[in-house]
Image (spheres, rainbow, N blue to C red):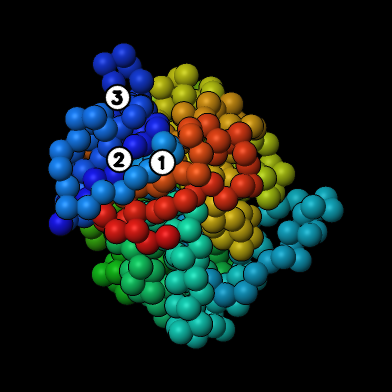
């Protein structure tokens, strides 16, 4: 059955136009959907006939958000830690261990129910594709169940056993890497698509990170890297060398880092919610975009450093504090996220792509930054079906 969404006031396609506009914006537009895929896009006046018609009422329509970095499977929360940070305590990677304890204590059903609640929360705010990392189990049994549960709700599952060194391996980081690259990887690889590592002071060294990533690559997992969140380091160089799909955070980047990213196909995923929640300095997205780096935006939903699932919020912060235009921020949250996941079927509204769209209660995408905190998502379409 075909469905025509018509009377779209502003349509963000993310198909680069002949005048160089990367958002490929159309006005007075329509989109034809058949069997979950987009089959036609153009002027509403030229739209073909369809079995059903949905009138957008002149509203703006954008691709569904592609959130390429999240940690949605965990137990407990860290509200007290957040309160302490707001009172001046510095953020440190070690706080992850408190979530590990709560996650290990939770049952599969408890984790599953909470995960599905987060998915509903994401969908209601326009996210139609999400990547989910493990990293709060840090044992063979617990990491396996986290990636297994994540795989129930998304194909974009990342094994992040190398999140931090757990308490039982304190001062024995190399031994823990042996576990991650051996029995833990064996248990988790069947459920995952990606491998990730937190290459940072207080987490894993460059040498340890290389071992983790190369072991994952050998098992058929594609690499991603957490790096340069807490300070400058060599994580960007490692990510580019190994052909990582993305480096995530990038709060502290040297000129050499920016040059390396601009000359590669590694996407830099910025996570505005982290800087908002930790009071770290915001990365300069203007510097990155002007240098030719491909930038994505993601929520990094997690209980410690960014407990938000709202991509509209992240867009507003990116525009207000990171130097992005509204158009650039929306592109980064859709097509940029798709690039970070190396997906060629989402993040764009064009024939052949999945019919993942968001209808806004607004005449233009600018309102996502112009009206922060306002629930502007009216309808969410996933594979041609209204899901929120």
Residue 152: x percent and y percent?
Answer: 33, 72
Q: Earlier in the sequence, mark 3 or mark 1?
A: 3
For the residue carrying disc 2, how many other residues have a C-alpha within 10 Å: few (<14), some (14-19), or many (20+)? many
Task: Give SS at disc 3.
Answer: loop
Residue 306's tag is: none
Res. 20 in view? yes
Residue bearing mark 3? 16
Task: Give SS at disc 1.
Answer: loop
- Does 197 sit left or right of 317 as displayed? left
Residue bearing mark 1? 57
Quadrant assignment, res 168: bottom right
Residue at 66% over, 63% down: 95
Measured along the vertical axis of the image, is residue 188 above or below residue 87?
A: below
- Does 359 sit left or right of 352 as displayed? right
- Closer to the camera, 195 or 373? 373
Cα separation between marks 3 and 1: 25 Å
- Does 130 sit left or right of 80 as displayed? left
For the residue carrying disc 1, how many other residues have a C-alpha within 10 Å: few (<14), some (14-19), or many (20+)? some
- Closer to the camera, 319 or 103? 319
Q: Earlier in the sequence, mark 2 or mark 3?
A: 2
Residue 262: x percent and y percent?
Answer: 39, 25
Q: Quadrant of the N terminus?
A: bottom left
Q: Nearer the viewer, mark 2 or mark 3?
A: 2
Residue at 46% over, 65% down: 120
Q: How many marks?
A: 3
Residue bearing mark 2? 6
Res. 227 in view? no
Cα separation between marks 1 and 2: 8 Å
Residue at 51% over, 74% down: 114
């Amino acid at each position: 059955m075909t469905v025509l969404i018509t009377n779209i006031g502003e349509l963000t396609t993310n198909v680069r136009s002949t005048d160089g506009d990367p958002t490929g914006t159309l006005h007075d537009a329509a989109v034809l959907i058949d069997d979950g895929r987009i089959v036609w896009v153009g002027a509403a006046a030229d739209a073909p006939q369809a079995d059903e018609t949905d009138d957008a009422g002149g509203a703006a329509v954008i691709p569904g958000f592609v959130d390429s970095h999240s940690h949605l499977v965990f137990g407990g929360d860290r509200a007290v830690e957040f309160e302490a940070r707001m009172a001046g305590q510095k953020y440190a990677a070690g706080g992850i261990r408190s979530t590990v304890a709560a996650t290990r204590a939770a049952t599969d059903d408890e984790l599953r129910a909470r995960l599905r609640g987060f998915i509903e929360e994401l969908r209601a705010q326009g996210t139609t594709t999400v990547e989910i990392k493990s990293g709060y189990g840090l044992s063979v049994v617990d990491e396996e169940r986290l990636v297994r549960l994540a795989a129930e709700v998304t194909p974009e599952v990342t094994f992040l056993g190398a999140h931090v060194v757990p308490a039982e391996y304190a001062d024995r980081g190399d031994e823990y890497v042996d576990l991650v690259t051996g029995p833990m990887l064996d248990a988790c690889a069947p459920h995952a698509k990606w491998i990730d590592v937190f290459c940072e002071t207080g987490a894993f060294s460059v040498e340890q990170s290389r071992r983790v990533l190369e072991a994952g690559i050998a098992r058929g997992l594609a690499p991603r890297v957490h790096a340069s969140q807490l300070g400058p380091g060599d994580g960007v160089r490692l990510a580019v060398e190994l052909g990582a799909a993305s480096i995530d955070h990038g709060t502290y980047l040297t000129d050499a880092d920016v040059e390396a990213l601009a000359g590669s196909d590694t996407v830099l995923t910025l996570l505005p919610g982290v800087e908002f929640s930790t009071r770290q300095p915001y990365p300069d997205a203007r510097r990155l975009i002007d240098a030719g780096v491909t930038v994505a935006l993601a929520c990094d939903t997690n209980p410690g450093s960014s407990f938000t699932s709202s991509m509209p919020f992240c867009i507003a912060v990116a525009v207000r504090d990171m130097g992005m235009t509204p158009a650039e921020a929306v592109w980064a949250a859709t097509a940029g996220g798709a690039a970070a996941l190396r997906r060629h079927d989402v993040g764009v509204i064009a024939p052949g792509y999945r019919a993942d769209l968001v209808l806004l209660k607004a005449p233009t995408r600018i309102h996502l930054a112009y009206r922060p905190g306002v629930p502007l998502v009216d309808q969410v379409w996933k594979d041609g079906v209204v899901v929120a």
